[in-house]
């Protein structure tokens, strides 16, 4: 339910100037260090969109293009993700596509879940491919 609220806020604010309101996650355990490691690895531009700012300020949130693309690191395991679900692998990272929210994707690593919302005219596959490289680097498993 919380992810749906975040998505609605992001879509409502997309295209607006200024800071975007995004509810930051509260990573636990190994996810804290993994998300701290991810923050400086994220690109300044993503699919032609400049990185922006979000409020409240959090190292676990990144937005591009006024919030039309948003990343939250250290979210809980997706409630709809079943143990038998197949993940779509992109550049070494497994992605769960939420069947009820076509703009919501979650990267599954051994240390953290990273949620990405891709809205507007952006092609999710390209955005996820660009984010997979830095996300792969937070894993504790050797690549």
Image (cartoon, rainbow, N blue to C red):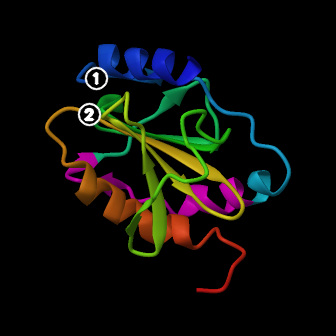
Furthest toward the bottom, the residue is: 143
Foreground of the two, 39 or 82: 82
Above or below, comparing residue 88 to residue 102 in the picture = below
Quadrant for the N terminus, please. top right
Choose top left, top right, bottom left or bottom right for residue 67: top left
Foreground of the two, 98 or 142: 98
The magenta segment is 34-49
How far across and down, in percent of the image, does residue 72 sit? 55, 40
Q: Which residue corresponds to the image point at 26% horizontal and 56% vertical from the top-left?
A: 125
Left or right: 105 as drawn, with respect to 35: left
Q: Which residue corresponds to the image point at 65% horizontal and 42% vertical from the top-left?
A: 77
How far across and down, in percent of the image, does residue 143 sit? 58, 86
Please tell me how many numbered marks the rendered image carries: 2
Could you tell me how far apart the alpha carbons at marks 1 and 2 are, in whole angstroms?
9 Å
The residue identified by callout 1 is 14
Q: Which residue corresponds to the image point at 63% horizontal and 30% vertical from the top-left?
A: 24
Above or below, comparing residue 113 to residue 4 in the picture = below
Left or right: 7 as drawn, with respect to 77: left
Furthest toward the right, the residue is: 29
Above or below, comparing residue 110 to residue 123 in the picture = below
Which badge, 1 or 2, is on the more N-terminal residue?
1
Q: Which residue corresponds to the image point at 23% horizontal and 53% vertical from the top-left?
A: 47
Q: Which disc number belongs to residue 119?
A: 2
| Crowding near the residue tagged with mark 2, few <14, some 14–19, many ≥20 C-alpha atoms within 10 Å | many
| Crowding near the residue tagged with mark 1, few <14, some 14–19, many ≥20 C-alpha atoms within 10 Å | some
Kind of element beneath mark 2: loop
Quick check: is 95 in the magenta stretch?
A: no
Assess whether mark 2 and mark 1 are in contact (beta carbons under 8 angstroms): yes
């Amino acid at each position: 339910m919380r992810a749906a609220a975040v998505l609605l806020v992001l879509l409502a604010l997309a295209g607006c100037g200024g800071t975007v309101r995004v509810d930051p996650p509260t990573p636990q355990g190994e996810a804290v260090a993994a998300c701290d490691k991810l923050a400086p690895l994220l690109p300044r531009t993503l699919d032609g969109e400049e990185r922006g700012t979000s409020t409240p300020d959090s190292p676990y949130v990144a937005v591009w293009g006024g919030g039309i693309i948003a990343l939250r690191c250290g979210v809980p395991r997706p409630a709809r993700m079943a143990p038998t679900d197949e993940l779509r692998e992109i550049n070494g990272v497994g992605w769960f596509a939420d069947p009820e929210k076509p703009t919501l994707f979650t990267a599954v690593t051994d240390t953290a879940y990273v949620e990405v919302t891709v809205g507007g005219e952006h092609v999710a596959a390209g955005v996820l491919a660009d984010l997979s490289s830095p996300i792969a680097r937070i894993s504790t498993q050797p690549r």
